[in-house]
Amino acid sequence: MNNNNTLIDSHVHFFKEEDLTVLGSDLPYKLPDANPLVDYLSKLESSGIKPVLLNNVHLSILPDSANVFASFDELAQLQLSHPGKYDHIRLVGTIKADPDYANEHRLRHHQVVGIRIVLHDAPPESVDPGAYSTLAWTELYDRLASHQHVHIYAQSAQTNLLVLRQIPRKVRVIIDHLGTCQVEKGAHDSAFLQLLQAARERGNIWFKGPGYRTSTDIARVKPFVARILDVLGADKLMLQASDAPHVGADQAGSAYSSMFDPASAFDFVRQLATAASECCTASADDLLHGAALTVFPNQ
């Protein structure tokens, strides 16, 4: 069972049907069902789950992060309309990492905690060695407050590493989906190990779950978590995330939405954390959300 006093969702996407109307057919995955904040909370409530912290992460298929800001207003309205019911929830957001979009005004919103670079299945050779170190990007990094971070998502560990190397060392970074979605390469893959070593040298890099994009098989994903724990320690890992509404498919082509809903995603990460806790002195709760206050400090 989840500990509802501390349960967080470090990676979720809240958006409505109208947010999807601007999209065409050229998408990296099947058009997802809408996932409004109120529906998500209702589903969790029916399972007896009451999260205390939610991070609404920029959804890559959307042209901007207007839905993230809209969710802030939605929660505020829910709290006004239902006194006491939602007061325990803190909602933060991670917006689109674009030098033009992530301007001073948007970054200064007190609920914005970071910016997200999304590369999906981009191969390492597609990453321009100077793409994320131009003057415009440097100015964007300088606009980040000390508590904000850059959130990187690429399926390839090597791609993640090439992007990380272009980001100033002073900038806090979160590496998505345990750093790799290529389970077939194994936890001893040289690129994955180099990524972990680079994170260790910098000291301000965290890896996050939920882990099912690496593999939906706990036994196959556990070695990657164990390697992160061995190189970086439990304080640089945060497994508790649903990644709702579970867009995309696994390596066999099975839709994640057919395997997970928010409640079962939290069950998955709890099982993964329990299995991984056997590899270290940290508890499953430590691995799930122990780093939350460091990654998402109250401002």
Image (cartoon, rainbow, N blue to C red):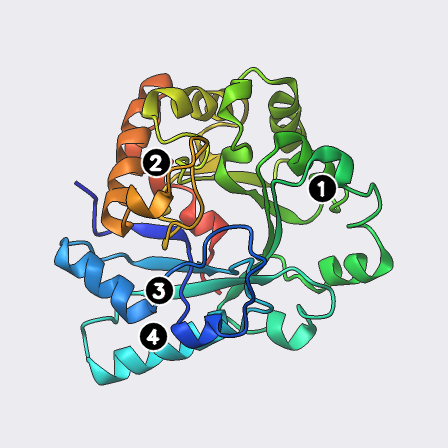
Mark earlier in primary sequence (1, 2)? 1
Regarding residue 20, the answer to whether it shows in the image is: yes
Mark 1: secondary structure: helix
Location of residue 220 in the rendering, given as x and y in whole percent from the top left corner:
39, 21
Relative to 65, is 160 above or below?
Answer: above
Q: Are marks 2 and 4 in contact (CB under 8 Å)?
A: no
Q: Residue under circle 2?
A: 286
Q: Which numbered disc covers residue 75?
A: 4
Where is residue 183 shown, x and y percent of the image? 49, 24
Earlier along the polypeptide chain: callout 3 or callout 1? 3
Residue identifier under label 1 = 163
N-terminal label among 4 and 1? 4
Nearer to us in this view, 61 or 159: 61
Residue at 55 percent of width and 19 percent of height = 185
Whole-angstrom CA distance, mark 3 to mark 1, is 30 Å
Location of the N terminus by quadrant is top left
Question: Badge 3 local density, few (<14 within 10 Å), some, or many (20+)?
Answer: some
Labels 3 and 1 touching (C-beta < 8 A): no
Q: Amino acid at mark 4?
A: Leu
* Image vertical order of residue 153 relative to residue 97, above or below: above
